Amino acid sequence: MDMRQELAAKAEKEGASSYRIIEARTGDSWHATAELYK
């Protein structure tokens, strides 16, 4: 599963209708910050 798929799954689990990625970093692992919209 890639970063976008994982963020979409987490947003759906939280009941969000959409999300916007604010920050994303990659390397050996990844980190992302997103705003969820309900």
Image (tube, rainbow, N blue to C red):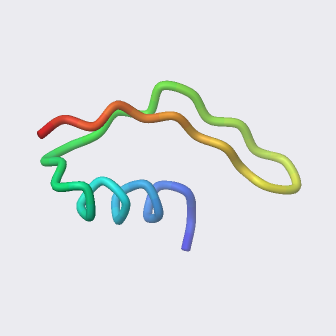
Left or right? Give the position of 28 relative to 21: right
Q: Quadrant of residue 19?
A: top left
Q: x%, y% of residue 6?
A: 47, 63
**Which quarter of the figure is the C terminus placed in?**
top left
Residue farthest front in this picture: 14
Counting from the top left corner in percent of width and height, residue 17 is at 13, 47
Q: Nearer the viewer, residue 15 or 27?
A: 15
Q: How many marks on residues?
A: 0
Which residue is rendered at x = 34% and y = 33% of the image? 20
Q: Quadrant of residue 15?
A: bottom left
In-front residue for pair 8/14: 14
Residue lying at 18% horizontally and 35% vertically, measured from the top left: 37
Q: Residue placed farthest to the bottom in the image?
A: 1
Q: Quadrant of the N terminus?
A: bottom right
Q: Is residue 29 above or below residue 1?
A: above
Q: Is residue 15 left or right of residue 23?
A: left
Is 36 displayed left or right of 37 in the figure?
right
The quadrant in which residue 5 appears is bottom left
In this rendering, is residue 1 above or below 10? below
Q: At 55% across and 57% down in the image, what residue appears?
A: 3
In percent of width and height, residue 8 lies at 34, 58
Single out the residue that lies furthest toward the right.
28
For residue 8, side relative to residue 32 (left or right): left
Residue 10, given in percent of the width and then of the height, sits at 37, 59
